[in-house]
Amino acid sequence: MPNHVSSEKRVRQDVKRQAYNRFYKVMAKRAIKDVISSTEVADAEQKFRRAAQVLDRIADRGIIHKNYAANHKSKLATHINKLKKVA
């Protein structure tokens, strides 16, 4: 248990920040899973645009690293290109 007022405040802020970050990380993971689980090219492309927006937004906010976002967008684009070849 913290002994100083400022330490107590930091604990309260950390709890709020952790919940905030968890919400956005889960949102990103869901967006990524939606793209991977889609089997139609048009549907996958639409979900990819949404996932890219989510990843870019949370990377700008500093919740995830920008390279993490870029790597995932690249992997999703590769997945969509494989769907196009199959179709």
Image (cartoon, rainbow, N blue to C red):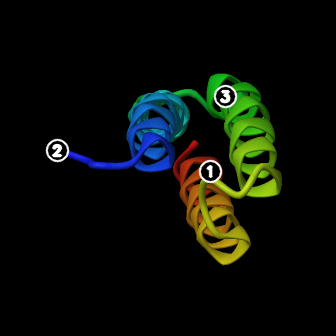
- Circle 2 is placed at which residue position? 1
Which comes sooner in the sequence, label 1 or label 3? Answer: 3
Vertical position of residue 44 compared to residue 64: above or below: above
Q: Position of residue 62 (x, y in %)?
A: 71, 58
At a point 62% along the width and 50% down the height, the residue shown is 80
Q: Position of residue 18 (x, y in %)?
A: 42, 39
Position of the N terminus, as image quadrant, is top left
At a point 55% along the width and 33% down the height, the residue shown is 24
Query: Mark 2–mark 1 contact, CB under 8 Å?
Result: no
Question: Which residue is nearer to you in this view: 56 or 37?
Answer: 56
Vertical position of residue 70 compared to residue 30: above or below: below
**Mark 3 residue crowding within 10 angstroms, few (<14) / some (14–19) / many (20+):** many
Q: Is residue 6 left or right of residue 19?
A: right
Which comes sooner in the sequence, label 2 or label 3? Answer: 2
At a point 74% along the width and 29% down the height, the residue shown is 50
Q: Position of residue 31 (x, y in %)?
A: 54, 32
Kindly state the secondary structure of the residue where label 2 is placed: loop
- Circle 1 is placed at which residue position? 80
Q: Amino acid at mark 2?
A: Met
Q: Amino acid at mark 1?
A: Ile
Kindly state the secondary structure of the residue where label 1 is placed: helix
Q: Position of residue 72 (x, y in %)?
A: 58, 62
**Mark 2 residue crowding within 10 angstroms, few (<14) / some (14–19) / many (20+):** few
Position of the C terminus, as image quadrant, is top right
Query: Which labelled disc corresponds to residue 47?
Result: 3
Badge nearest the viewer, 2 or 1: 2
Vertical position of residue 34 compared to residue 32: above or below: above
